[in-house]
Amino acid sequence: MKKFRIFILTVFLVLPISASALGQMSQPINLTNAMRGQQINQEMIVVNNDDKQIIAEFSASGQIKDWVKFYLPGDLKNFKATTTIEARTNLNLIAVFSIPQDIPNGEYKGFISVANLPDLYVAKDQSSASLTQKIDRQVTIKISDTETVNLAVSVIPETYDLTLNQPLNVRIIYDNQSNVSLTPAINFKIKKDEQTVYNVIYPYPEGVAPVNSRAYFEIPALSIPTAGLAAGQYSAQLQFLRADKVLEEKQFGFSLGSPTSASGEKAAGFFGGKLNGWLGLLAVILVIIIGLLVKRKLDIRKKSSR
């Protein structure tokens, strides 16, 4: 029997996800104040609304055709031209735009696209139609020489209550809202009663990629030693630096040594001391009572023997 193939070009803004097997986030990408040589991350969400898995292909077109590569979140080293999307699932991707070093200032337009590859395994003795869909997302990038720097940071301690000598482990997640890549250093201070007991500057980790423009990125967790610090309440103060400029400041409180245990020990010491005193007094009273009882018993025997 004869095979035939139908190629359909669709735009996600016109056809909703429910009407097609393939879809992607439809909001246009508008990047302003982009700078030459920078990398800009943008999230993509691709939807497989079909009842079977598909092979999706990613591409770019227009003036930005050669600027884009596609990656899975958590793996920004190995770009993806195609990947499999399971039935009725969403796929998250990161489109990384690399702005050329020698591009003139101006506005550049194009599309990032996802298409499902046709089924290559159709039985030769059957008629079939292989439906191909391509979903475009519009991209506009304005190149500028104006540098803007804005960094948001999430600071997440592993715990706020540490035992003596337990390291203070802290997760750091960057949200780079700048139009340049950043490699912030961290000035980490610990204070107790307004007195600084720890003050170290941690450079950006060696061998770790910079935080791209508009990217979320978590660096390896910091492990702050607490050996030698006494039990008590402390304040951690963090400054995030670019050269000598402070981009962001964060702080949190934590305790060192278990307050409950310390209170328990104090209580045990207090009541233990009191208890020892009472036990000694009780022993004296018991001796007196026993002596009186013995004396009374002897008196009764003497009277009965007369």
Image: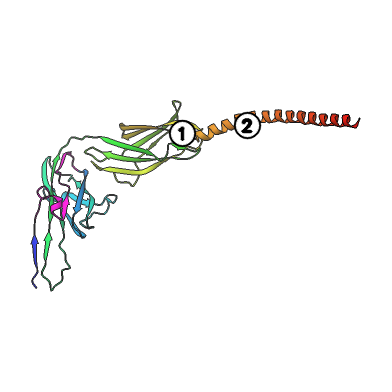
Q: Amino acid at mark 2?
A: Gly
Counting every numbered tag in the picture gives: 2
Quadrant position of residue 279:
top right
Magenta residues (range): 9-36
Labels 2 and 1: the sequence-earlier one: 1
Residue drawn 26% across the image and 39% down it: 176
Q: What is the CA distance from the residue labelled 2 to the residue labelled 1?
A: 27 Å
In front: 216, or 291? 291
Secondary structure at badge 1 equals strand
Secondary structure at badge 2 equals helix
Position of residue 300 measured from the top left corner of the image (x, y, whole percent): 84, 30
Left or right of 232 in this view: 93: left
Left or right of 161 in this view: 244: left
- Residue topped by disc 2: 272
Quadrant of the frame with the N terminus: bottom left
Position of residue 52 measured from the top left corner of the image (x, y, whole percent): 20, 60
- Residue topped by disc 1: 255
Q: Is residue 51 magenta?
A: no
Residue most extreme to the right: 306
Quadrant position of residue 27:
top left
Left or right of 305 in this view: 71: left
Q: Amino acid at mark 1?
A: Ser
Mark 1 residue crowding within 10 angstroms, few (<14) / some (14–19) / many (20+) = some
**Residue 211 can be seen, yes or no:** no
Quadrant of the frame with the C terminus: top right
**Residue 186 can be seen, yes or no:** yes
Q: Is residue 23 magenta?
A: yes
In front: 242, or 259? 259
